[in-house]
Amino acid sequence: MQTPRSILLHIDSSARSAARTALARQLAEDFDAEVIAQPCMLTSLARYPYAVDGAAAAVELLMSLDKEGLDSAHATFLQAAAGSPRLQWAEPLADGPWGFARRALYADLMILGQREEDDPSSAEVPADFLPSVLVESGRPALILPYAGETRSVGRTVLVAWKETREAARAVSAALPWLRRAAQVHVVAYGDGIDDSLRALERYLAAQGVSAALHTGGVEEGDMGNALLSRAADLGADLLVMGSYGHSRAREWVLGGATRTILQTMTLPVLMAH
């Protein structure tokens, strides 16, 4: 992948929106990129449709709450953006979260946040917002965990390799970080993986990336936690992996490792579907 020049940043009223904005500002400076800060939240009327049948005063109150939330998100953005001309605020999307994937078609990279169920602001987007945006846009996403402080991204990178198009797209998207990293590790699980690891090593070498290879052993049932444990052992500050999932009966059915990572991630993750 070419160095990302256009970054789409998801903005909501959560406390972690500031951390995403600060990271976007840093990446914009590192990669000479522009960032579109896109506020994307469900309206209160969409979250509480029964209010439409209530008193007009109740509807007006919900609309005022939306304005307060948007104003708060804008203020948080301005503070974290620190006046950088590379970051631009966009108007809210008319169709809210459902329009974000379409807007992402015009960006090289998305910056998103892990869903925190205990945060009241989590209701501002549908529960399947992350996987649906990944699948529908086809764009890579850098996803930040809601816990902990993100001090750096990409000094030590762990690539979860598998001979799939999703993993290959993730590696391609990660090349700007891999070329700058102090250490790059690649891990693969299963039988007969030596040849695929060596093939990836040659590909990365052609891209100017030197990588340490790791055989993870037998593919486990809980691959997500195995990857997080490996990342912790290596001191990684970025995990690169494919995102697996499909739509069924209007619900997103995620692969086991993808689901675990999105639920329990402990470091930034670069995903591509």
Image (spheres, grey):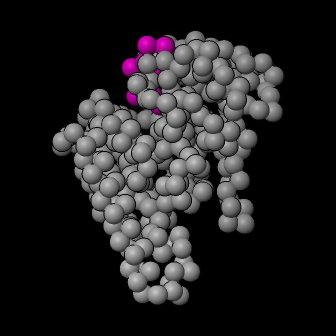
Residue visible at 78% across and 18% down in the picture: 217
Residue visible at 24% across and 47% down in the picture: 78
187 is higher (above) or lower (below) than 106: above
**Foreground of the two, 239 or 180:** 239
**Quadrant in the rendering for residue 166:** top right
Locate residue 220, reporting x and y percent. Answer: 80, 28
269 is higher (above) or lower (below) than 92: above
Figure disc tally: 0
Residue visible at 44% across and 61% down in the picture: 41
**Which segment is the magenta one?**
174-184
**Foreground of the two, 54 or 14:** 54
Locate residue 208, reporting x and y percent. Answer: 43, 17
Queried whether the magenta region covers residue 231, the answer comes back as no
Image quarter where the C terminus lies is top right
13 is higher (above) or lower (below) than 163: below
127 is higher (above) or lower (below) than 46: above
Image quarter where the N terminus lies is top left
Classify residue 200 as left or right of residue 142.
right
